[in-house]
Amino acid sequence: MSNEPERHPNAIHRHRALDAIWATGPGLQRLAAVNHNVIGKRFMLTALVFFFIGGVLAMLIRTQLASAQSPFLDPGVYAQVFTMHGTIMMFLFAIPFFEGMAIYLLPKMLGARDLAFPRMSAYGFWCYLFGGGIVVAALVGGVAPDSGWFMYTPLSSRLYTPGINADVWLLGITFVEISAMTAAVEILVTVLKLRAPGMSLDRMPIFAWYMLVVAGMMLIGFPPLILGSILLEAERAFGLPFFDPTRGGDPLLWQHLFWLFGHPEVYIIFLPAAGVLSTLVPVFAGTPLAGYRVVVAAIVSMAFLSFGLWVHHMYAAGIPHVALSFFSAASALVAVPTAVQIFAWLGTLAHGRPRFSVPMLHVFGFFTVFVIGGLTGVMLAMVPFDWQAHDTHFVVAHLHYVLVGGFVFPMMAAAYYWLPHLTGRQPVHHLSKIAFWMVFAGFNLTFFLMHLTGLRGMPRRVHSYPADAGWEALNYLSSVGSFVMAMGFALVALDLLLIARFGRAFRRNPWKAGTLEWAMPTPPTAYGFAALPAIDRRADTLDPDRIGPELAAGRGYLGGTRNGWMETLGVDMATGRPDQVVVLPRPTHLPLATALATGGFFLALLFKVYWAAPLFAAVVLALFLRWTPQTGLTADLGPLPIGRGEEAPHHAEAEAPPSQWAMVFTLAADGTLYVSLLFGAFFLWLSAPNWPPEQLGGTAYPAQALGMLGLLLAAGMGRRAVRKAAGAVPALTAGALGYAAALAGIAWMAWTALPDPTAHAAAASMAAVLAYAGLHAGIGLVLALYGIHRVRRGFVSPRRTLDLRIGRLWHDYTAVAGGVALAFPSLLATLARHGAVP
């Protein structure tokens, strides 16, 4: 193993050497692909397939509603079609499509060769594909979810949905959300750590800022939905009554957990599209984005505000008036950062000399449609109006104006803008304009009229309506518009295919943009940049035509190859100073195998083969551990030359490598789920009927003490192990024994002190919190044993303590979370005895 990079006599030799290291092999090796080019394309193409399926379902809905008392679909089939349309569009199209776009674009815009965790991206894709496949297969089999894409209880409970329809949604969508969580961590770490040298935070391209904020929102927004799905599936499968009011539960708890995710999700979908607009508008205006720093502040403030709006969807649910006033004001306030971005785009256009190409047609389509959706959103934010329009077609119209205007039109603009990068073919706009006008006209004909049917009182989610209601003519016109829009989308798809096949070839940067993705060959090579650039200005005001040839000639960082490593640079988060050489893993089938095992776990739960679920979980854990032999070093390397006379350590010897930050962000998401669980328990205590329960359980102070001492021992020994490094085996052994004691204490407490968890929501909440603590103690035990293995195999030294530092983070978190869990049953029992709300 050599510290020195290999020299290459010319660009062609350099390209061949890099391509041999980074390229994905042919045939079945494609299933082992981890490169961001491949994974990003797969995400986007799969999302478009789901978009097609969702669009067909939308046509079925509009055909049913075109006339009163239509016999086209019976109520049961309509409920499945309606539920699946919303589920596919929200969970299987919108979010995965922008995930794929971010996976494909971000390394290129940031001046990196790949994402921080390529195998995790591949695993996320397979989870998305298999989870989405389960949901769609249920539709084909006639057992699709039929309780609405929001799955409100009690309709989705076992009593009213006795089949597996609801289970398909709860388990299939949770399977899909694994990909969302992996993408969130991947994007956060990549944007913060894997940038070109010199690219400080205030020099990042604006699209990277948008994706950084969106990834943070996903990290906090998705865990409440995942928790809600777990709790509802536990109620359906095992009778734990979290949402059953006859046993101390409350259906409103589901609404709170769902909309804690659901309203931020609107902005999670909108902000990537806004990032596209903030990238495209300056290019076609010929001038930098107006108010770059103000726009960054606006998107950060929008992210914070979005988490204070979830009751916006629950105005009619009996919320106290003071709370309604707060959420109404917050719902109106979020229009301010949105307006800041819109005026920044308009100001950019006003200061430049706009070129009205096809991407700009879709940009102006966005302006028209989204502004209307935003105005109706402000109307619905006002409680008196919302009470009148709640659950009517007015809300349906508003939702589509925001999501189609705020996401689909910008995504079509992005498709025309970046298709040359994907294909190496420049657009020839024969069908583009007519396709746009058909989509635009058809959309407005379809959904603008829904405002009118809603104001006339037509409720949403109905499969028929009386002929004398005065809604039939408007519904018929809406249905005609939907078919015009569908034909427009078909023309867009045909146009993009024709461009990809017959478009004009070009050399570089057809739009004269200023971002780094245009400084590489198109279509891009697997390694992206032959050398990494040095950035001395904002990274959306660069000159790709000058930078591209310099990088191809190797004049930059990491301009050679070394030891067959897949190398890119890690930088200081704030300043962009290079601080490590990140060595990425090679292509492997392990992500596919791990996703298949994960799918087996979810299918075992779906088909009630509960004995098989732990077996699949064990296989998943074993496969994840199989990922690790490729990572780390068995000898100290010291500083490595990285070019331009600079040096940096291997990431295994760095102070803050990407994997350490990944654990920090994972624990942040984990903590959000835990806080949501505790929130749910205290919400039930405050609001649910039939409290206090007849049985509150006994005390188990010895079990609590044993569990707490075990957790503290494990956390202390985890810290000691980091200090001891290569001599950490005794400390890690003691930590493993501490976890064994903690698991014994938790089991003792559950066995002796908890009442029947199916009898009342209080006992179910206690059981859920203790199960959370037990799961984390079990994982901590695995990490302690894994640390012993890594020390004995020579992966740990005083300079190489990364494995132990990652373990320390988990041990510290588990000690805190476990301590709260061990005290929780006593606390909840005390509150129930002395502070129950009548």
Image: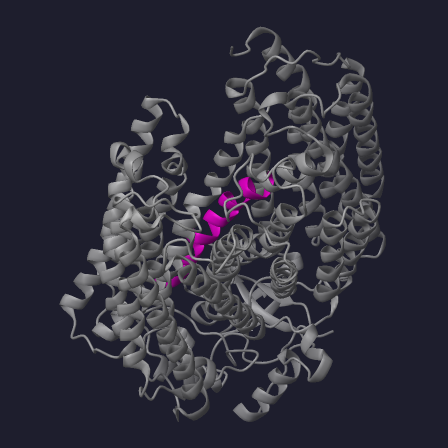
Q: Is residue 658 visible?
A: yes
| Residue drawn at the location 85% of the way across and 52% of the way down | 792
* Identity of the residue drawn at 71% across and 21% down: 759
In the displayed structure, would residue 652 be above or below residue 605?
A: below
Query: Residue pushed farthest top?
Result: 834
Quarter of the figure with residue 680: top right
> Of 322 and 713, which appears nearest the observer?
322
Relative side of 727 to 468, left or right: right
Q: Majority secondary structure of the magenta segment?
A: helix
Residue 223 among magenta residues: yes
| Residue 800 coordinates in the image, percent (x, y) | 71, 54
Q: Is residue 575 above or below residue 282?
A: above
Q: How far from the left and from the top, in percent, is residue 320?
A: 37, 22
Within the image, what quadrant is residue 503 found in?
bottom left
Colouring scheme applied when the structure was drawn: one colour
Q: Can residue 209 be seen by looking at this rendering?
A: no
Q: Which residues are magenta?
A: 204-227
Q: Which x, y percent locates residue 630? A: 74, 65
The residue at the point 67 percent across, 78 percent down is 30
Q: Magenta stretch containing residue 539, yes or no?
A: no
For residue 134, which quarter of the picture?
bottom right
Q: Quadrant of the N terminus?
A: bottom right
Q: Nearer the viewer, residue 431 or 226?
A: 431
